[in-house]
Amino acid sequence: MKRCLLILIFFLFGANTFAQDQFVGKWEMILLPSSTSPIKMTLNIGDPEKRILYPASLTIECDSFNANYHLLLVKKNIRQLGISRNKKIISEMPFSIGNWTVYLNGIFDISKDLRGNSLLTINRIVTNDMVVAMPELTQFTPTQTSTATRLSSFLKDSIIQLRQTSKMPWKDSATAAIVSFQLNSTYFGIVESIHLRTKEGNVKFNENKDNDIVSVFLNGNKIIDEVDSRKKRPTEEFLLDTGLNIIAFFADDYGTKGVSTASVNVEFDNKIVPLDFKFINNIAATFIVAKIYCDYNENDNTRFKDYSMNDIDQSNDINKPRKNSNDNKLLRDNKTIGSILSTSQQITLAIWDDAIEDGDSISLNINGKWIAQGFPVKKKPQFITVTLDPGPNTITFVADNLGSIIPNTSVLEIIDGNKRKAFYIETDLGQNNLIKIFYDFKPS
């Protein structure tokens, strides 16, 4: 009986307790040119904090050059890690390559090769002008120039793909410092932590003249997903979890200026946390991270969450009958365009076309239930009343067609009592838009 109980406990909790993080471990690549010595790169990744912040160590070997750096990796989604701009020099011999490690900035993308081996590939963020001061080859001695030239070309232009050779996490006395602002003298992209007694916050975009593409995540969930920072955006609301929260502001694309110039303010009552890519240490960076500690404990389950198809009663089982032919449209790519907190169980959606009425038709789904199908978007606002569930809700906007002007566009205004918030909807036959609404239900 005891043995059966232990087995049951293992199956109930084993997946979470013993699951191996796919990013953690040792990753290696060797570039073997035909006429010169190999270049070897080794990346060691340690156990993450909150499964988001990963401390890491990077080693590069080329001819007589040998260097080791510490860096921070930040999880963007289930297959991508952002790479910190700054790499702390632990050792560099017999010369320094200065800021050349900035060439590696971008995203590590995980995949599998044909044999099922895990690979990490660097996808650099394309930039026209690095802005950051880089060493010139003329700065090196004649004996160093050949090696320096190879290193520069490798870091800037080569396909960098590392194969996982061990799943053992990197252990070092420095790992705690890498994921902490207070413990490390090197800035890895984490700003100073703050403590709060409120769960409610918002993200406010500052004016930006360049078309940088950016995203904002809270505890791994999207608040803003790849939006153009040049366009005026409404304030985005969110709710913190009790305890540690991690807000990550990602530069997805550098726009026309070669570096991101976007910035947001994360605001809580009278406290403001600025996240600004124009700050000198964030120039040419991939991300900025803020740690927020929330002491509010009325309800731990108060966060916006990402809905999977299972959450909205969908299934990939082809043998399961679908309730509606429109259900297949929920399986398109979904882009989160905003969030809002509501204090009312019933809200009103106002929908209209602010440009030219061109025959657009949309369908609306809330929490897996269709509330409108084949809904024509007119020049004049039309109104739909929606009843929310307590806690998190997701409204999905689905394009039925593309009208005469591509893509399918409309304006949505959410009316919650005296509170109104507008969103610009832009969908097509391959991508839906999501808006997350949290109904802050307080029983009387």
Image (cartoon, helix red, strand yellow):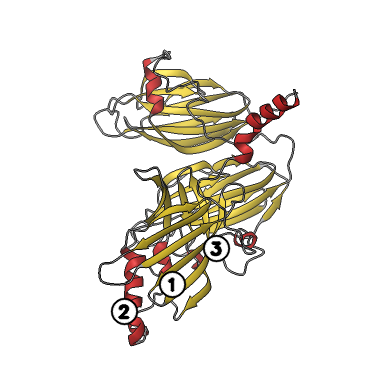
Q: Is residue 228 visible?
A: no
Give the side of residue 292 with respect to residue 166, left or right. Answer: right
Tell me the crowding category of disc 2: few under 14, some 14 to 19, or many 20 or more residues within 10 angstroms, Cα based: few
**Residue placed most toward the observer, 158 or 311:** 158
Marks 1,2: beta carbons within 8 A: no
| CA distance separating discs 3 and 1 | 14 Å
**x 31%, y 79%: residue:** 146
Quadrant position of the N terminus in the picture: top right
Tell me the crowding category of disc 1: few under 14, some 14 to 19, or many 20 or more residues within 10 angstroms, Cα based: some
x and y, in percent, of residue 320 in the image: 43, 14
**x 52%, y 34%: residue:** 306
**x 45%, y 36%: residue:** 423
**What mark, if any, has residue 188 been given in the picture?**
3
Q: Nearer the viewer, mark 3 or mark 2?
A: 2
First in residue order: circle 3 vs circle 1: 1
First in residue order: circle 1 vs circle 2: 1
Q: Secondary structure at mark 1?
A: helix
First in residue order: circle 3 vs circle 2: 2
x and y, in percent, of residue 390 in the image: 63, 25
Which residue is labeled 2 in the image? 146
What's under tag 1, amino acid-wise?
Asn
- Residue at the left extreme, as displayed: 404
**What mark, if any, has residue 99 been given in the picture?**
1
